[in-house]
Image (cartoon, rainbow, N blue to C red):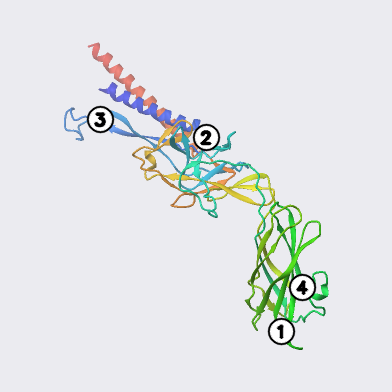
Amino acid sequence: MGYNTAISGLDAAQTDLNTIGNNIANVNTVGFKESNAQFGDLYAASLAGSAGASTTPGIGVSTVDLSQNFTQGNIQTTGNPLDMAINGPGFFIVNNNGTMDYTRNGQFHVSSNGVLENNGDLPVQGFQPVPGSNGRFSTILSNLTISESAMPPQATSQAALVANLNANDVPPSVTPFSASNPNSYNDSTTFQVYDSLGNAQDITLYFVQASGTGSANQPNQWDVYYSAGNSSGTTVATGSLTKLQFSNTGQLVSGGSASFTVSGWGDGSASSTISVNLSGSTLTNSPFAVTSENVNGYAPGTYSSISVQSTGEIDANYTNGQKKAIGKVALANFANLQGLAPISGNLWSATATAGNPLVNSPGTAGLGVIQSGAVESSNVSLSSQLVDMIVAQQAYQANTSTIKTEQQDTQSLLQL
């Protein structure tokens, strides 16, 4: 029986050495999680005495499990924006020939057909943006496509400005208003807009303190006019925009929203209708100033780079200063991580023991966040593994000594 006991010890020690060797071999594998061999003793009820009694010797050892250590590895920066590290729980999802597998290795690249893939050329799974939804994403997993197509221009349709008008101003000396005569208005401001072809055009707003009945002025009322000029400096539209009414505390009470139409810019572009919002403007004893300006629309742009947010959102950046969300990386987690089965390619496959994958966006439902331009190192502690290897090697040598001693005892019996 001593032979069998020693052989089981040899098998256990060899399993321990194999496990440690695999950990050491993967000390530089991105996203790798070390494993630990777990053992249990063996007893047989058929031996003299009942199983578990103090007079019952054991019959060896068996490998109970290979436990995986899912602690966080160190995060190392790479400078590649497509490299991603998960800071916290969760796994990237990849499509392995129709089967969803999971990994902590975020070394990604774009394939020749624009699909985001891992270093094993498996498509990374995520959520696509919902068209026209203003930032919402689908909840259905699909391959993430990195589009490098150009961004078309967007014509300006809205302009929001906040200005302060000087309460000490008096009505202009010249009437009626004329954009070409500075003596016919008090103040003006110019902002840039874009037509349907992406050409930059100028809009100027003119502020005129209104006159009251007879010789009495109405400092709380201001007329606003507009003038549109194209890139060649030609005025293509002008007119009255709105009348601002301020309270006696200088707050705007009416006339803050209006719109005008430019029927043609003279460059072949479509007509433009622009809504102007002056809400928040004030009337105080301070010089005229524009404190805020927000105008939509932009020129065409070409793809320049990509960026990944901590929420997993992937944005394409363009030369016109704009960016567009083109997808969001999905993460998955499991109730029982020890139920995940490791497979080649630094992947895990889900088993019934692991439970159903809980798929969500990074930073939600207890999942970690994404760090772009970085990867997660292996969590193998090389020094600990080397010490464990010495212990496993001693166990192996000790079990061979048991076999040698058993052999000597057998020889002694045969010589009687």
Residue receiving disc 1? 218
* Front one among 78 and 404: 78
Number of other residues with Cα within 10 Å of mark 1, as a class: few under 14, some 14 to 19, many 20 or more: some
**Alpha-carbon span between mark 4 and mark 3:** 99 Å
Closer to the chain start, of discs 4 and 2, is 2
Marks 1, 3: nearer the viewer: 1
The amino acid on which the numbered mark 3 sits, given as a three-letter code, is Gly
Circle 2: is it few (<14), some (14-19), or many (20+) Cα within 10 Å? some
Contact, mark 4 vs mark 2 (Cβ under 8 Å): no
Q: Which mark is residue 308?
A: none
- For disc 2, the marked residue is 29
In this rendering, would 226 be left or right of 121?
Answer: right
Secondary structure under badge 2?
A: loop
Q: Which residue is mark 4?
A: 187
Per the image, label 4 sits on a secondary structure element best described as strand
| CA separation in Å, label 1 and label 2 | 76 Å
Q: Residues within 10 Å of mark 4 (few under 14, many from 20)?
A: some
114 or 349, nearer to the observer: 114
- Residue placed farthest to the left in the image? 49
Q: Are marks 2 and 3 in contact (CB under 8 Å)?
A: no
The mark that comes first in sequence, 2 or 3, is 2
Specify whether residue 226 is in view.
no
Residue 58 disc label: 3
Q: In which quadrant is the C terminus drawn?
A: top left
Give the residue at x 31% y 30%: 62
Q: Quadrant of residue 80?
A: top right
Query: What is the three-letter code of the residue carrying label 4?
Result: Asp
Q: CA distance from mark 4 to mark 2?
A: 66 Å
Task: Name the residue type under label 2.
Answer: Thr
Q: Quadrant of the N terminus?
A: top left
- The amino acid on which the numbered mark 1 sits, given as a three-letter code, is Gln
